[in-house]
Image: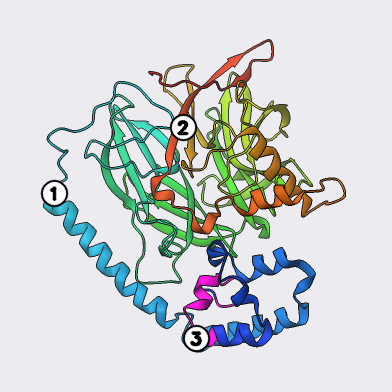
Amino acid sequence: MTYGLDMLIRQVKEDEEAVALVNRYLPGILVMTEDRPEANGMSLRSLSRYLGDRLPAESLSALERELVSLGNKRGCISPAEAERIKQYMELAQEREKEYADAGRRPDENPTRYDAVYPGQIWLDTYGRRIQAHAGGIIEENGYFHWYGENKEYTDGKSNIWTWGIRMYRSKDFYNWEDCGLIIPPVVDDPASPLFPERKVDRPHIVRNEKTGKYVCWIKISGPEACFTILTADTLQGPYEIVTPFYNPFGLHIGDFDIAVDEKSNKAYLYCEAEHDRLVGIRLTDDYLAADEQVSVQYKDLYAPFCREGVTVLERKGKLYMLTSGMSGYVPNQSDAAVSTGFESPFVSIGDPHVDDESLSSFNSQIGQAFRVPGKDTYIALADRWVPEYTVTRERALAIRQAIASSHDPGKYPATKEQMKELMNAPMIESAETRIADYVFLPIEFSGEDASPRISWKESWTL
């Protein structure tokens, strides 16, 4: 656990000494959260920003020092966290035994699909929800391999954020067999970037033709705002950590994508940086570090207009970047941008979701794009993080206005109703993403400028 202002309210409440410190320096703040369960997922720092000038800066600084000192005294493991580590170790053993006992065999009457059904519950060949969120697809040896965040234990109540990275495989793209965890969680070390309570997000795997290695970059959200870099000799692993916490050029990073120039085999990473721009970074020849920053786009924007959900694809000599706005797990309007080369800046060309009246990217967020090998066929791989929360056009506009008002209330004044809409929206830390669904849709290119277009389809086939 990170002791300091980045502690979540729920982490504070489970530690008596931390509660005493918060009550001393910020009296009444914990009482204020009692009738707001969603606030338990906020950090002390984010809550202080939300309250603005109501919290004295000197009190926050003193509290930070005291909490850090408390953490150092305990080795950064609270009594409650020590108990959870024990539970995680037992859970890992139970899960391993469950798979061994099942023999990893599909059910006798598995669900069979003959198409992709966007937004509907998608089960694997064992009859379980597919858990490969914000991931990607790689075709190899006659199989499609789909990997992503395993959210099977992320119920919005426990401290588990991601339980490793899971992979599936399929011959037809519709029916997916669970291949297990290719990157399992590290359940006994809170300092590890793969500890279940770390915000492990958006794995990206690419193969380096020169070294023959598979390289995986993972985003670690939270105060570190960094990457973890791993390598493996085979697609399904095992993966080993090369660099646990990496901030290229000292930047705090966010959502990202990696694209490889097939002509030069050079890899480029495009990521949100410092919540106010997207940067393009050429990687070293082994894909294990940043080499040089080559572009900047979407600069000097603030939430909800700054960009995340970064997705990059190449088609006929042009690069296209698809991004979402920044509003947490509340889906919002996407934007497409085009570039003439891997080291050139991107220029916005508008929302690719041409018939989306809800301004919510069909209530989803694109994480990666997949090109079907040998075809001019591209698929947007999107997640519907909170399927029980439907965004309408009116709700999208209200939440956009409310978020923007915190940065520029003069330009974006928000009404009480709009602020209430934002406060009632699902929060990242308390969302039950284990029931998140997928919205996979084809990306079509049309018009004189061949702009990417994504239309809604109740079902479609490859």
- Tell me the SS state at disc 3: helix
Give the alpha-carbon distance from disc 2 to disc 3, as whole Å: 43 Å
Circle 1/circle 3 CB separation < 8 Å: no
Give the alpha-carbon distance from disc 1 to disc 2, as whole Å: 30 Å
Q: Earlier in the sequence, mark 2 or mark 3?
A: 3
The answer to whether residue 383 is above or below residue 449 is below
Outermost residue toward the right? 410
Report x, y in % for residue 14.
47, 78
Query: Viewer-proximal residue, 153 or 290?
Result: 153
Q: How many marks?
A: 3
Residue type indicated by callout 2: Val
Report x, y in % for residue 296.
73, 42
Residue appearing at x 44%, y 47% in the figure: 215
Residue matched to label 2: 439
- Tell me the SS state at disc 2: strand
- Any mark on residue 102, and which? 1
Circle 2/circle 3 CB separation < 8 Å: no
Report x, y in % for residue 112.
24, 27
- 306 falls in the magenta region: no
**Which range of residues does the magenta coloring cover?**
3-18
